[in-house]
Amino acid sequence: MPKFEEELDVALELQEPQLFKVLLHNDDYTSMDFVVEVLMGIFHKTHSQAEQIMLQIHEKGKAICGVYTYEIAQMKVEQVKELAKQNEFPLLATMEEDA
């Protein structure tokens, strides 16, 4: 059997993945300490960063906790939802496209 070598000239165009912001929203029931714990545990913020973001949430109604690919952002939102539920807090996390 003859051997055939075929060279394919294929140009691949790689695109940067779409990024999504994960936001935490203020409510009247979730404790500030719990929000700081969430920011440190799920979003890997330092204590100082977590306190700053928590204050933004408290004062402005919401704040960005991080920017991730779709799958990671979705996972972070679910982790916040589960942890809040376990601790009986109504803390809301959402995601939206990063401009």
Image (cartoon, grey):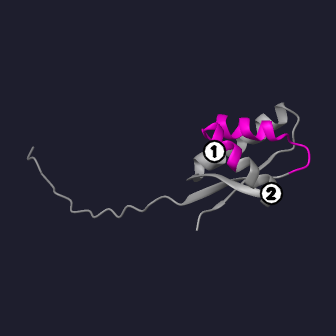
Task: Tell me if I can see residue 42 in this picture.
Answer: no
Residue span colored magenta:
27-52
Q: Nearer the viewer, residue 31 or 68?
A: 31
Most extreme residue toward the bottom is: 99
Specify whether residue 45 is painted magenta.
Answer: yes
Using the numbered discs, state the Cα–Cα distance from disc 2 to disc 1 in whole angstroms.
15 Å
- Image coordinates of residue 1 in percent, x first then y, are 9, 43
- The reply, left or right, for residue 68 in relation to residue 29 is left
Numbered circle sitting on residue 49:
1
Amino acid found under the numbered disc labelled 1: Gln
Q: Secondary structure at mark 2?
A: helix
Specify whether residue 43 is painted magenta.
Answer: yes
- Image coordinates of residue 69 in percent, x first then y, are 55, 52
Q: Residue at x 68, y 41 (%)?
A: 39
Amino acid found under the numbered disc labelled 2: Glu
Q: Secondary structure at mark 1?
A: helix
Task: Tell me if I can see residue 15 in this picture.
Answer: yes
| Displayed quadrant of residue 67 | bottom right
Q: Where 79 sits versus 22, above or below?
A: above
